[in-house]
Amino acid sequence: MHIRLMQLRDLPRMRAHFGWAHYICGKLAVTSGPQSVLAKHIQRYLARRTDSAKASFDAQHGTETCIRCYDIRYSAICGEFLKEMLTSVPEPLSEYGFVDVGSGKGAAILHARNFPFLRYYGVELNLQLVESALRNCRAYSVSTSIACDNCGAYSDPTRRTCGVSWVCGDFLRWSIPKEPLLFFLNNPFPPALNIPALEHIEASVAQSPHPALLVFRQPSASTARYLDLSKVWRPLRLAPYWRIYARQ
């Protein structure tokens, strides 16, 4: 199916916080006339709603994920957005491990723990963010009564472990496990590094017999073009704000 047709097909899937309306307003906002003013007003309202949802999650679980870190390029994913993407994957997630590329303070990992992945990997270069992610994982485990042996929150073997492995280091140098994996990228790098990150994933996938999935949120134009022309990835969903691929 043509890329544009797939985007139109999958636009209604962006239901979280009326993502489809945000997208349409983005198109109207760059026009001239009263519709532009109204569209920008709606976009600001929806952005505030998203920020409020992130803050509510932190207040509920005693975590600290939603505060932006502009100096080190960090912004947490909203749980409803991640749920929207993962529930759009037309394959059973229970067969895969979840890899958050550029995991920041761990928000995506925490939300992904509500899905039946085999295990979880958070890969982040910045030590300060990794330490925050560890604290958040412990707090979330206490709040949800899920064991967090890797993070040290519980030691009771009768509790279900969280299965999270935190990796502090350069993703481009990380030795990717040879197992079925879903790679999640919340646009974690400057555009110049997105393609090297994808090439690193593709090199690992080529050496593994296992299936792989790729979920990329808000790719840059150059990254989207790279994925459109890729012979490694087969598009499954192409919503305007996020894309889902399976290994060819």
Image: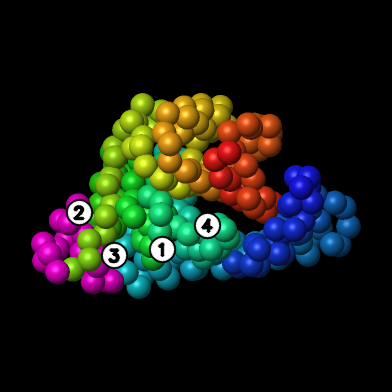
Quadrant that contains the C terminus: top right
Labels 2 and 1: the sequence-earlier one = 1
Report the amino acid beneath label 3: Tyr
Pointer 3 residue = 140
- Say whether residue 222 is magenta: no
Labels 4 and 2: the sequence-earlier one = 4
Labels 3 and 4: the sequence-earlier one = 4
Please tell me in which quadrant of the rendered image residue 71 appears.
top left
Pointer 1 residue = 115
Q: Cβ–Cβ below 8 Å for labels 4 and 2?
A: no
Q: CA distance from mark 4 to mark 1?
A: 13 Å
Pointer 4 residue = 91
Q: Residues within 10 Å of mark 4 (few under 14, many from 20)?
A: few
Q: Residues within 10 Å of mark 2 (few under 14, many from 20)?
A: many
Most frequent secondary structure within the magenta stretch:
loop
In the image, which residues are magenta? Answer: 139-158
Look at the picture and state if 181 lies above or below 35. Answer: above
Report the amino acid beneath label 2: Cys
Pointer 2 residue = 151
